[in-house]
Image (tube, grey):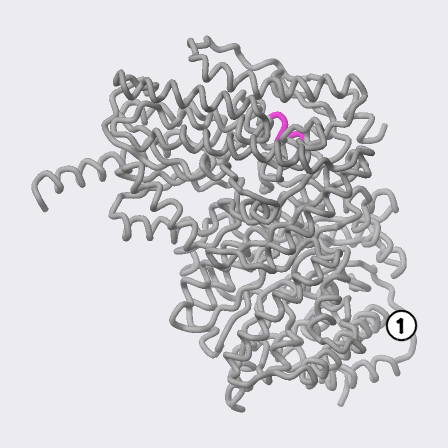
């Protein structure tokens, strides 16, 4: 049996993760959950109807596929969901047994195991097998080889948009021309694949929704600037699924706008989604270790720490007016920008969101992200005068996280922030 | 001069990069460090400067680089930074930092910070989608910037003719290395694995015209040898780098001859020439990069096929290899990502292989020795 046949006869060999008690959610949160569930359901329905289904990297310009009415799902989102439901180790191990080394990004390992026909116990995140893949490597180079592997497993076309790494805060015209040229090629490839002509008018409408989503998402993120905050920064991790999987949809924009109105109401009434009093405000750097959200949250709750800055979240707000603007916009991702821009981006966020300290995830799955973190850490300490501590982990391989080390580091951060408070109070 | 003496000279150069750097500096030349992969070194040569290859070190330990890098970074990249920090590369006037992998990307920034007051850091981010016209144009754009930055370092405006001449010198040096790889494979009794590596590695520490002269002379002598009656095992090596003499001696001790290689520091780096008849030498260099193929670091536009794996399997067949040894650089995710499909192609072609994890800081080779010995026994 070849890989594709294996994939189509995927067994479910592991036990399902335990069902957790669900708390009551606001209409905005429910609307956001529905958007993501609909994306997955639409893809499953499309497959049943014999329509094309694509897999896409999270920062591929979704506006292009949306214009073609293509059903697209996102392996990174799926891998995060699988990890959060504790099905990561099983799938990572399957990939490793197939020869994919344990040093490879855990999202990639989970997804490659899935692509080879190993179903996940996270039913909500089950994806039909792909008929094409959309790869944009603005996140990392690993993405390029990961998607080549999917294309090989399923013998399907890969549509590539390469975004080279930037050494300067702004990209130049030659860079934009290169990316723009690739957009044109990607559109042509999708025209051939779908047998449809690219509809410029529809593209404009989709871009309108994508910009509206980006604005509403940024508005939601900006509520973390209020002190105390009307929301828990941890909420952003849950809502990210929407900006990853459904940026170009009207429903997403509407759901974020609804959530923003709820947060506005919270501000007026003094309420917050944070389930404890906010004593300190921190930046949480890096993709969180999804299998350990509970362990991650526990010491934050104990010490009254609200996560009011997450650079990963606003990074998904792509705003532009035209195709060239789209090229410039997609050139800016946390792992594609130079050190100076990366530092400025976070420093501004820390200032705006009134952060007292930062917690850095040295993410074993992400070499591109962790690669200049020690220097960033030094700069935040010097330029912002805030304490910064790091902990070791992995975005989607639970074996690479140690809760005891994490708790000790959070404790150290709390002590440093308290010391800074004491100094401030005594006027030093 | 006898073959053995010539080989020993290359080996000595390969083992003493700092002496080579000092040698060229003493002649009044400027020097530019060139990190992996695919930097257009021709531009450094054309500017009258010495390009010093940087592929880590087998004798140093990572210490200062830890201030910048997390522990899960490949030793090659960390040791390049280490050598920039510890004074080994103080003779450099600039360094070129390509960004073909996720470790090189952020490390270009670390080097920019660490070398701020020491030397010019020349950044290079090749386009991966290098095939369409927009990709070729963007490669040209990157190379034009490098040319201008190198001109700043050299204080001299490089002419098109100088670059065209450099292309000819480099093509000649690449052809000589390709020829040498064939001859070394044909005469393993004369060229051990340790010496073979020395010859190829020396290219990173010599001006390429001097190197080509020397290698062509060696090749002429190897060509004149009678046909080999090699009784040992014939292998192909694969990986980013396998230049540790202690490790290579294990191959020699077990009568494993390297008949061809798919190694980034070796054949992958000189597989592809630049056109010599292009009026625009920058365009010629962009075409050379476009034509780079079968490489784990570069996007393969025919990604649904297993072209690279099959290419390496064919290389084994064409060279009548008994098996392949993959030297897997620890924490090298591009190489790791390609392994399952390389394995599929080798298995399909009936070529046995072993995969050995390596690192520049390896000091104990007991495990490698056992694995290579067992592999050689099986193949023999």
Q: Quadrant of residue A411?
A: top left
**Residue A186: horizontal and vertical position, in percent?**
72, 44
Front residue (pair A99, B160): B160
The answer to whether residue B367 is above or below residue A227 is: below
**Residue B62: horizontal and vertical position, in percent?**
46, 59
What residue is at 83 percent from the left and 62 percent from the top?
B232
The answer to whether residue A253 is above or below residue A287 is: above
What residue is at 77 percent from the left and 71 percent from the top?
B273
Mark 1 residue crowding within 10 angstroms, few (<14) / some (14–19) / many (20+): few
Task: Quickly name the residue at label 1.
Answer: B228
Front residue (pair B354, B339): B339
**Residue A383: horizontal and vertical position, in percent?**
28, 52
A137 left or right of A239 in image: right
What residue is at 63 percent from the left and 22 percent from the top?
A39
B119 left or right of A143 in image: left
Query: Residue placed farthest to the front in the image?
Result: A201
Q: Quadrant of residue B298?
A: bottom right
Q: Quadrant of residue A403?
A: top left
Looking at the rendered structure, the secondary structure element under dot 1 is loop
Quarter that holds the N terminus of chain A: top right
Instruction: Give the magenta part as a residue range.
Output: A90-94
Front residue (pair B101, B257): B101
Q: Does the image show residue A95?
A: no
> Magenta includes B170?
no
Q: Does the image show residue A28?
A: yes
Chain assignment, label 1: B
What residue is at 61 percent from the left and 71 percent from the top?
B144
Tally the marks. 1
Magenta: main secondary structure equals: helix
**Residue A325: horizontal and vertical position, in percent?**
56, 47
Query: Residue placed farthest to the right in the image?
Result: B227
Front residue (pair A400, A18): A18
């Amino acid at each position: 049996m070849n890989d594709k046949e294996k994939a189509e006869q995927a067994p479910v060999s592991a036990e399902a993760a335990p069902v957790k008690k669900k708390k009551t959610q606001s209409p905005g949160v429910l609307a956001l959950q529905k958007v993501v569930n609909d994306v997955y359901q639409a893809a499953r329905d499309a497959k049943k109807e014999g329509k094309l289904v694509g897999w896409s990297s999270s920062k591929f310009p979704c506006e292009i596929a949306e214009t073609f009415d293509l059903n697209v799902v996102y392996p990174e989102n799926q891998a995060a969901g699988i990890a959060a439901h504790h099905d990561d180790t099983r799938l990572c191990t399957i990939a490793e047994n197939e020869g994919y080394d344990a040093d490879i990004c855990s999202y990639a390992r989970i997804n490659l195991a899935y692509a080879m026909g190993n179903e996940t116990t996270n039913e909500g995140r089950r994806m039909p097998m792909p008929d094409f893949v959309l790869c944009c490597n603005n996140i990392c180079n690993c993405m390029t080889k990961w998607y080549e592997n999917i294309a090989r497993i399923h013998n399907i076309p890969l549509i590539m948009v390469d975004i080279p790494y930037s050494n300067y805060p702004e990209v130049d015209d030659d860079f934009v021309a290169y990316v723009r040229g690739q957009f044109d090629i990607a559109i042509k490839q999708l025209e051939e694949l779908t047998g449809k002509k690219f509809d410029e008018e529809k593209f404009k409408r989709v871009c309108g929704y994508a910009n509206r989503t980006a604005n509403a998402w940024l508005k939601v993120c900006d509520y973390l600037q209020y002190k105390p905050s009307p929301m828990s920064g941890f909420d952003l991790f849950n809502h990210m699924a929407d900006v990853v999987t459904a940026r170009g949809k009207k429903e997403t924009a509407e759901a974020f706008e609804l959530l923003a109105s709820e947060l506005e109401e919270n501000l007026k009434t003094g309420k917050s989604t944070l389930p404890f009093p906010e004593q300190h405000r921190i930046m949480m750097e890096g993709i969180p270790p999804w299998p350990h959200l509970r362990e991650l949250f526990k010491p934050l709750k104990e010490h009254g720490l609200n996560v009011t800055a997450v650079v990963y979240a606003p990074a998904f707000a792509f705003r532009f007016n035209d195709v060239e603007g789209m090229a410039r916009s997609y050139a800016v991702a946390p792992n594609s920008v130079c050190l100076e821009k990366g530092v400025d981006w976070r420093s501004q966020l820390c200032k705006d969101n009134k952060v007292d300290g930062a917690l850095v995830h040295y993410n074993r799955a992400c070499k591109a992200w962790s690669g200049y973190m020690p220097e960033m850490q030094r700069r935040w300490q010097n330029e912002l005068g805030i304490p910064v501590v790091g902990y070791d982990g992995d975005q989607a391989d639970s074996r690479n996280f140690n809760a005891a080390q994490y708790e000790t580091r959070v404790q150290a951060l709390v002590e440093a922030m308290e010391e800074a408070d004491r100094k401030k109070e005594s006027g030093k | 001069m006898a073959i053995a003496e010539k080989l020993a000279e290359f080996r000595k150069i390969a083992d003493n990069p700092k002496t080579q750097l000092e040698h060229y500096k003493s002649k009044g030349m400027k020097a530019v460090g060139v990190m992996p992969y695919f930097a257009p070194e021709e531009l450094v040569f054309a500017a009258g400067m010495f390009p010093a290859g940087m592929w880590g070190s087998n004798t140093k330990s990572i210490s200062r680089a830890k201030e910048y890098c997390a522990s899960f970074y490949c030793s090659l990249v960390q040791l390049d930074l280490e050598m920039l920090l510890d004074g080994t590369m103080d003779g450099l006037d600039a360094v070129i930092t390509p960004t073909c992998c996720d470790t090189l990307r952020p490390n270009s920034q670390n080097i920019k910070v660490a070398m701020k007051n020491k030397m010019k850091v020349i950044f290079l981010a090749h386009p991966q989608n290098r095939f369409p016209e927009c990709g070729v144009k963007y490669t040209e754009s990157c190379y034009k910037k490098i040319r201008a930055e190198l001109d700043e370092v050299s204080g001299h405006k490089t002419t098109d003719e100088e670059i065209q001449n450099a292309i000819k010198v480099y093509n000649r040096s690449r052809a000589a290395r390709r020829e040498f790889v064939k001859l070394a494979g044909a005469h393993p009794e004369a060229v051990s694995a340790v010496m073979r590596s020395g010859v190829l590695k020396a290219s990173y520490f010599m001006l390429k015209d001097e190197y080509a002269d020397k290698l062509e002379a060696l090749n002429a002598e190897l060509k004149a040898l009678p046909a080999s009656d090699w009784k040992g095992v014939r292998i192909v090596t694969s990986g980013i780098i396998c230049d540790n003499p202690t490790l290579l001696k294990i191959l020699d001790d077990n009568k494993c001859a390297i008949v061809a290689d798919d190694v980034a520091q070796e054949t992958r780096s000189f597989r592809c020439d630049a056109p010599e008849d292009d009026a625009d030498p920058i365009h010629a260099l962009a075409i050379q990069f476009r034509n780079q193929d079968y490489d784990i670091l570069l996007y393969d536009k025919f990604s649904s096929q297993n072209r690279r794996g099959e290419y390496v399997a064919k290389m084994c067949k064409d060279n009548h290899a008994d098996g392949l040894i993959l030297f897997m650089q620890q924490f090298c995710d591009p190489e790791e990502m390609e392994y399952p499909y390389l394995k599929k192609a080798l298995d399909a072609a009936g070529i046995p292989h072993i995969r050995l994890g390596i690192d520049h800081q390896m000091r104990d080779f007991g495990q490698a020795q056992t694995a290579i010995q067992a592999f050689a026994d099986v193949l023999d």
